[in-house]
Each structure stands twice: as C-alpha cells, then as structure tokens.
C-alpha cells in the first residue's frame, strides 16, 4: 500500500475494522504483507513486459492456503466467504491479474470440480490445485458467445464409452499454463462439463497477446480438436447451464471485494501524492476541488465496502442470491473504475506512468468491468429480479 498521509485512511471514516473479526483481519493483513513483499516490487515490470511467474506465485499462494480457500476438504482451507473476499481485495490492490489467478483457480476450476465432480475427480485434482502444484482454467466463453453462453458451439459427442470434444473457447485466464481445464460443451442431452487434462491429444491453448489490460496475467484461447476423454471425465452432477453459471457467481463474489482493492490502492496513492505535490505555492491537497474529489471517491469506496461485507455475511449464512451478487459486481466494478480514472486526473501526467499504479489499475478494471458478466448483463439480472420480466433478448 502507498504510505498514508497525516489524515485519516479513507476506510477508517467508515470504521470498517470494527465490523471485522480477528481472523478476518489476520487473513487480510497476511495477504497484504505478502503482496507488499513479493508482488509490489515487481508488478510494474511484469505488467510492462506482459509476463508473470505464474507457477512460482501459484505455489506460494497455495502454501498460504489462498487457492480454493473458501472450499472445505481436499487440502482447502475452509475459510469464510468474507475472509476470501478480503483476501481478494488485497490481491487486487496489488494487481487484478493476481486476483484473477486466484479467482479462476479457486472459484471457477476448483469450485466446479468440488461442487459437481466425482469423488475420483476431487481426489485427483483438488489437492494439487489447492497447493498450486497444478494450475487450472475454466472454459466457458467462446469467440461468439460471451454474455450468451447458452449459444455455445463447442460439442461433445459419445463414441462408445468415450467422449469426443470439438470447439474453441476464448479469453481463458491461465489457459496456456494450465494442467487441467474444466470445459463446458453442448451434448445431445444439453450442456455438460468435462475435466480435461491439457496434455490430452488435440488440446491446445495459444496465448492471447498484445493486450492493453491484465497484462500481468495469462490469457488464452482453448482449441479442442477431437479431444478424446473417458466417460469418467464428465462432471456427473452438473446439469445444464445452471452449473457453469453457479461457478461464475462464485467468481463474481470475489470481484465484489477485489475491485475495491484496486480502487483503494488508487486512492491511497493519490492521497500521498496530493499531500506532497505543491502547486501555486501550496499542497494540491489544500484545494477545494481536490478535496471534493477525494471526498466523493472515499464515499463510493466506503459504500462499496459496506455492500461487500454485507454480501459476505449473507453468503456465510447461506442466504445470498445471484441477483445480490450482481448488485455488488455491478456497483463495485463500476465505481472502482470511476475512482481509478478520477485519481488519474489528480496525478496529472504522472498518472499515466508505471511509476504509479493508477493507470495500471484503470486499465485492468476495464477488463474487470466486462468479465464474469458485463455491467449490462448485471443490470438485466437486477431488472429481472425487480420486474419478473426477462429482458435478455
């Protein structure tokens, strides 16, 4: 984190620590310390070069119990949803790519196997994924089907006792380095999920390059060309499109907290900058327009944090609904991006350099705003809940 100025920390105005328990604060502080020591000294360089030591980081994150940390058994930590959210917030305060790595590993790949897989699939993959010894990815989005996954063209057909998969997936985090992919495909009986070892003949994952966002993250295409799998590869408990959508809801929950981490880092950086930047013979922080911007950003950050924590408590109680996660994802991703952009204005030309994290966060948040459901999709989810009228078509 950037060094705080003599004023109060933005979230201290909301007394956030007073509504966290000791374990939650300990997890948050541990992840914050890891990011400060292991990630922050290198992240600007990783972002600039579009590289990241993903396997090394995965093992370190696994050793800390952060991979699939909200799942129970199979080497997973069994932490609360709120603790997981706070960890996501600290990871994304370092970089959205780091949180994406953890989110795709735990809330998509591992959750899909944990929730819908056989005991054999769980025993084979979950301990390795939890430790970071194996990397996973989640193949749902296709080149022509993002917001409408039900239109997917990837097919799985029976051939004797085997399944044969053909199709293409797009924008897949971790894909090029993954050891296992959870792939969703259309069958004669509807949508089904498959556990696909990436060493399978016919499977390839070319990396997507020339990105302007999430540069410290591996993003790939998945190509399945006659990939033959045994009958045991299917996720037997996954029935229809509701299964992958439930996995996406797990990932969206992490974004509710994660996006706020990027916003908080931008605001902390900006507070320190305006305190030390002199313009017209006094600190930039002393001007009314500056303080108005800081006040508005602090208000949105704090409101987003209170919403995230409320959703975390609902999830821990088993009472959260999909449309409530949409509320959090829509608001917090949208407001985080707005905060990052506003902070950039206060840093002036310095705001566009990698010497400061603000433009990097803003660029990353452009992706966060879109993935795991665009803002428009979440607006329609909320609208459906309010009116009982589906308006997706």
Image (tube, helix red, strand yellow):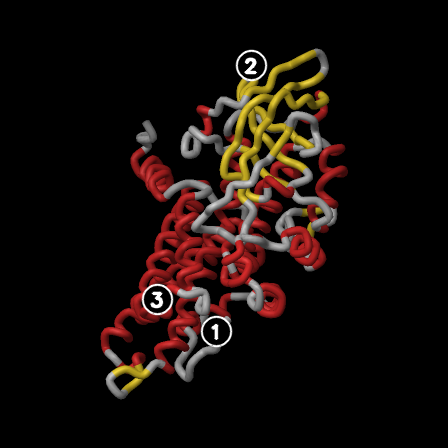
The answer to whether any part of residue 306 appears in the image is no
Q: Is residue 208 above or below residue 196?
A: below
Which residue is under mark 3? 343
Helix or strand or loop: what does disc 2 sit on? loop
Residue drawn 44% across the image and 43% down it:
371
The residue lying furthest to the bottom in this view is 281
The answer to whether any part of residue 348 appears in the image is yes
Helix or strand or loop: what does disc 3 sit on? helix
Could you tell me which quadrant the C terminus lies in?
A: top left
Helix or strand or loop: what does disc 1 sit on? loop
Does residue 378 appear left or right of residue 217 in this picture?
left
Q: Dot 1: within a 10 Å radius of its alpha carbon, few (fewer than 14), some, or many (20 or more) residues?
A: some
Does residue 184 appear left or right of residue 144 in this picture?
right
The residue lying furthest to the top in this view is 160
Residue drawn 33% across the image and 40% down it:
376
Q: Is residue 3 above or below residue 103?
A: below
Tell me residue 27's x, y (percent): 61, 64
Q: Are marks 2 and 1 in contact (CB under 8 Å)?
A: no
Q: Which is more N-terminal, label 1 or label 2? A: 1
Q: Which mark is residue 319?
A: none
Residue drawn 66% across the image and 31% down it:
195
Residue drawn 48% across the image and 30% down it:
142
259 or 347: nearer the eye? 347
Label 2 or label 1, whichever lies nearer to me, is 1
Tell me residue 351's x, y (percent): 37, 67
Q: Quadrant of residue 84?
A: bottom right
Q: Dot 3: within a 10 Å radius of its alpha carbon, few (fewer than 14), some, or many (20 or more) residues?
A: many
Tell me residue 111's x, y (percent): 61, 41
Q: Which is more N-terminal, label 1 or label 3? A: 1
Q: Which mark is residue 188?
A: 2
Which residue is under mark 1? 2
Q: Quadrant of residue 36?
A: bottom right
């Amino acid at each position: 984190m950037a060094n705080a100025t003599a004023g109060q920390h933005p979230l201290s105005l909301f007394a956030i620590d007073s509504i966290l328990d000791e374990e939650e604060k300990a997890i948050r502080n541990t992840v914050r310390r890891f990011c400060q020591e292991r990630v922050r000294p290198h992240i600007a360089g990783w972002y600039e070069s579009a590289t990241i030591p993903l396997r090394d980081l995965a093992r370190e994150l696994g050793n800390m119990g952060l991979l699939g940390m909200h799942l129970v058994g199979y080497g997973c930590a069994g932490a609360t949803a709120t603790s997981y959210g706070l960890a996501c917030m600290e990871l994304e305060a370092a970089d959205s790519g780091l949180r994406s790595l953890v989110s795709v590993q735990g809330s998509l790949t591992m959750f899909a196997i944990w929730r819908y897989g056989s005991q054999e699939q769980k025993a084979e993959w979950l301990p390795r994924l939890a430790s970071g010894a194996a990397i996973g990815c989640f193949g749902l989005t296709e080149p022509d089907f993002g917001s409408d996954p039900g239109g997917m063209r990837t097919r799985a057909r029976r051939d004797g006792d085997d399944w044969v998969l053909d199709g293409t997936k797009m924008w897949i985090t971790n894909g090029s380095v993954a050891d296992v992919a959870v792939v969703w495909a259309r069958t004669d009986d509807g949508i089904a999920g498959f556990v696909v070892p990436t060493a399978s003949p016919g499977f390839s994952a070319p990396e997507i390059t020339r990105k302007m966002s999430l540069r410290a993250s591996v993003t790939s295409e998945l190509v399945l060309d006659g990939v033959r799998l045994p009958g045991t590869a299917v996720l037997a408990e996954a029935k229809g499109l509701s299964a992958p959508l439930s996995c996406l809801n797990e990932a969206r929950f992490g974004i509710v907290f994660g996006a706020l981490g990027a916003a908080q880092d931008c605001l902390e950086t900006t507070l320190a900058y305006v305190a030390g930047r002199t313009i017209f013979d006094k600190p930039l922080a002393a001007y009314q327009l500056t303080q108005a911007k800081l006040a508005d950003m602090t208000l949105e950050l704090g409101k987003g944090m209170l919403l995230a924590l409320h959703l975390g408590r609902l999830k821990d109680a088993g009472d959260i609904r999909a449309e409530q996660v949409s509320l959090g994802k829509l608001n917090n991703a949208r407001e985080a991006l707005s905060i990052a952009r506003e902070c950039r204005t206060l840093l002036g030309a310095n705001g566009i350099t990698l010497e400061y994290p603000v433009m990097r966060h803003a660029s990353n948040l452009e992706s966060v705003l879109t993935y795991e459901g665009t803002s428009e999709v979440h607006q329609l989810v909320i609208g459906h809940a309010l009116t009982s009228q589906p308006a997706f078509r």
